Image: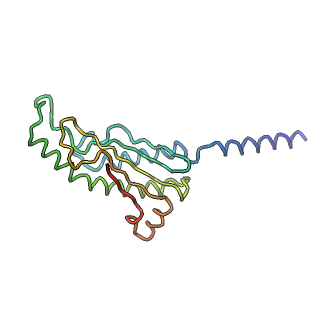
Amino acid sequence: MKNICVSFLLLAAMAFAAATAPRVSRTALRAMEKSLDEQISRLWPDVPYLLIGPTRGVYLEGYGAVFTAEVNLVPNPSSLMAPVVSKADIARLHQLKLERIPLLKKALREALVSTAASLDTVPATEQVTIVALLDHYAWEDLSGLPSQVMVQAVKGKLLDAQRTGNVESVIQVSEN
């Protein structure tokens, strides 16, 4: 009888642990954070601080996985020797950022596909979202530049579209 009670308690404890355990582990999110950091950091070798801090991921039950990264597309042209930024530098920086936005979007779309494929425990009906928060300087010309770029898709639809080679049709890209 004692063995039956112990077995019952053990099964109840396991059921409770399974019910309270997060669907997506912190370990899985951390692996994706690291992967996103590596993918983003390789985009432009001329920007030593492309990522401002590490990517952060969170799983939201019923929604899906969300990753955010703060990105600096172009290095600051000012320095201790030349602290004043010229109008030509501002124009050059603005143009370079405008040119890099489409490349960032492409990289984020590719990262979204690989992230969705790696997060096995995110249900197929939930979203995978990556948001790049774009860093701007106080003196910068912000016309036409977004403050963030977001890519997202329903995981199952994205993986199905990947098999058919049509991922662009299911990825939503927005900037604001």
Image position of 59 with respect to 110: above or below: above
Q: Residue furthest bottom?
A: 164
> Measuring 22% from the left and 50% from the top, which residue is drawn there?
144
**Residue nearest the viewer, comparing 32 with 99:** 99
Residue 43: give x, y in percent of width and height.
Answer: 28, 50
Task: Tell me the quarter of the picture where residue 85 sits.
Answer: top left
Horizontal arrangement in the rendering, residue 8 relative to residue 86 (left or right): right
Q: Tell me where residue 128 appears, x and y as whole percent.
A: 46, 53
**Residue pictured at 44% horizontal, 58% vertical:** 153
Residue 121 in the figure: left or right of residue 105:
right
Q: How is the image coloured?
A: rainbow
In the image shown, does 160 or 152 lie closer to the viewer?
152
x 22%, y 37%: residue: 137
Residue 171 at x, y = what percent? 40, 60
Query: Relative to residue 65, is residue 175 drawn left or right?
Result: left
Query: Which quarter of the image is occupied by the N terminus?
Result: top right
Disc count in the image? 0
| Nearer to me, 33 or 146 | 146
Q: Is residue 163 above or below residue 55?
A: below
Q: Between residues 1 and 63, which one lies in front from this camera angle?
A: 63
Task: Answer left or right for 90 relative to 117.
Answer: left
Percent across and percent down for residue 141 are 18, 42
The answer to whether residue 139 is above or below residue 159 is above
**Which residue is drawn at the image coordinates 55% and 44% (left, top)?**
25
Residue farthest to the right, as pictured: 1
